[in-house]
Amino acid sequence: MTREHDGRQNNTDPFGLRGFDFSVRVPEKSEIFDADEARAYIDGCDYPESADDLLLALEMQNLFGPASLRGMRILDAMCGPGRLGREFLNLGMQSVAFHDGDEIMIAHAKEHAVKVLNDGQSIDMITSPVERIPVADNSFDLVITHNATHQMADIDRLGMAMREFLRITAPGGHIIVADFQRSTAPNFFRVLEERLQFTRPEIVPLLIPSFTAAFTKAEFGRVICSMEGIRKFTVTDAEPPTLSQKMRERVDADFVKGHIMDFSPISQRVIIQKEQV
């Protein structure tokens, strides 16, 4: 353990979290990175050992079942570097589309998705604002977005995105939002402090704003309750995954040890099923 970590553990508020009012949302500066930020994000986040998106892909496989998920038309919405979509392809999913508003992100996602394609698999690339995704109604069985909604400017923008996701989801299909949350619950502070202990010190000032910008479970609930055409939905804390020994070794190979901690009460899961026709 480093000396810095020793000092943090002796501090009752090691990261100054009690100085933030998590009951009030503070938006991030922008929904879209500029070119330099996009490249820096790709360089820092899309590395071979990362287990972050693999854990979410496995969570979806457990939720829907491998056979069912394999046949779904999947959209990795607001995909950034496209790692989640690639993890779906690596697990054998047949049809995966990648969407983002940033051309650099989409170009990177395409370059690396092509490398993992097998016979029978298909991909599509979509560059557009999230509130105007240029595909037909009912195009996808699963629309999923990972750690992206906290970048939205305000709750109205969140509502626009969620309604667009609903439009392009097929009847009976699902929308999944996996993202950080903002909370004042004691376990939120406890787990977030643990997460930050395993975050490189230079990244901590960049990560905390993601939590102050995240939406609460209640805010997601209000948005969803204002939407028509939903059969059912849940908004819950994320839960730690159950890992096989092989997957535990895979997670341990990821030098960002905090990734598995994101599957905890510092994150949330929004699961929406669209009405059947």
Image (cartoon, helix red, strand yellow):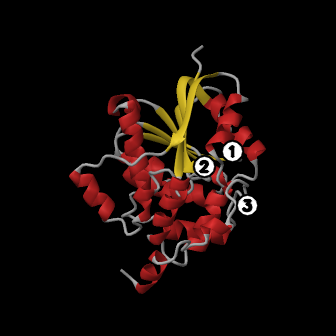
Sequence-earlier tag: 3 or 1: 3
Dot 2 amino acid type: Met
| Residue 18 x %, y % | 63, 66
Give, as a three-letter code, the residue at label 3.
Ser
Q: Which residue is mark 1?
A: 130
Residue occupied by mark 3? 30
Distance from disc 3 to disc 1, alpha carbons, whole Å, reads 14 Å
The answer to whether the residues at label 3 and label 2 have Cβ atoms under 8 Å apart is no
The residue sitting at 65% across, 57% down in the picture is 102
Mark 1 or 2 closer to N-term?
Answer: 2
The disc at residue 78 is: 2
Choose between 195 and 206: the one closer to the eye. Answer: 195
Q: Tell me how far mark 1 sits from mark 2, CA to CA.
A: 7 Å
Foreground label between 3 and 1: 3
* Residue 60 visible to the viewer: yes
Name the foreground residue: 49 vs 155. Answer: 155
Residue at x 34% of width, y 43% of height? 91
Q: Are marks 1 and 2 in contact (CB under 8 Å)?
A: yes
For the N terminus, the quadrant is bottom left
Pointers 3 and 1 in contact (CB under 8 A)? no
x and y percentages locating residue 234 in the rendered image: 55, 32
Going by the image, does 202 lie left or right of 151?
A: left
Label 3: few (<14), some (14–19) or many (≥20) C-alpha neighbours in 10 Å: few
